Image (cartoon, rainbow, N blue to C red):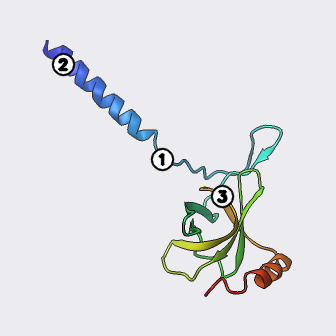
Amino acid sequence: MKSAIRIFLLSLVAVVFSACSQSGVRISETAQQDVSADKVTILRAGDPYIVHVDRRTRIVTLRNSVSLTPGFYISTNRTGEETAVLKLLPDDAEHLRTADILEGDPQINNRIRPASSTRSEELAKIYRDVSE
């Protein structure tokens, strides 16, 4: 009887721990790999990317963004498709920064890259009051 109870408790503990380890967002930090005929971009260690999206206040939180300078940024998904236009907010944290969502629908784990100078000029004309 005692061994049956022990087996039951051990099974229960195993189920609980396996369920806990399967939750959360998985972020890959490897080099680019061919997954199929289409190339899929994988995050590399140190690349800036989105870790949180607040659609109500239209703000994203960025990781690995310490080296980013103020300005306009483009978020892209794993296939390199543009998902949003962002404007970096003033620095207020050591490793996490925030940006306003100006256009689009960014997702968690989207990569961040600076907008080209031409695109930045166009965006500056459209969103000249974004910092106020």
> How many discs mark residues in the rendered view?
3
Q: Nearer the viewer, residue 61 or 34?
A: 61
Query: Between marks 2 and 3, how big is the CA–CA gap?
Result: 47 Å
Circle number at residue 5? 2
Q: Secondary structure at mark 3?
A: loop
Residue 64 in the image: x percent, y percent?
58, 68
Residue 109 in the image: x percent, y percent?
61, 56
Tell me the residue at 63%/56% (across/down): 107
Query: Between marks 1 and 2, how big is the CA–CA gap?
Result: 32 Å
> Can residue 46 be seen?
no
**Residue 38 found in image quarter:** top right
Residue annotated with mark 1: 24
Residue 5 in the image: x percent, y percent?
18, 19
Tell me the residue at 39%/33% (across/down): 18
Q: Nearer the viewer, residue 29 or 82?
A: 82
> In which quadrant will I find the N terminus?
top left
Residue 66 in the image: x percent, y percent?
58, 75
> In which quadrant will I find the C terminus?
bottom right
Q: Is residue 79 left or right of 61 when viewed as pictured?
A: right
Query: Between marks 1 and 3, how big is the CA–CA gap?
Result: 16 Å
> Can residue 111 be seen?
yes
User: Quick one: which residue is furthest to the left in this view?
Assistant: 2
Amino acid type at circle 2 is Ile
Q: Earlier in the sequence, mark 1 or mark 3?
A: 1
Q: Earlier in the sequence, mark 1 or mark 2?
A: 2
Q: Earlier in the sequence, mark 2 or mark 3?
A: 2
Amino acid type at circle 1 is Gly
Circle number at residue 110? 3
Q: Secondary structure at mark 2?
A: helix
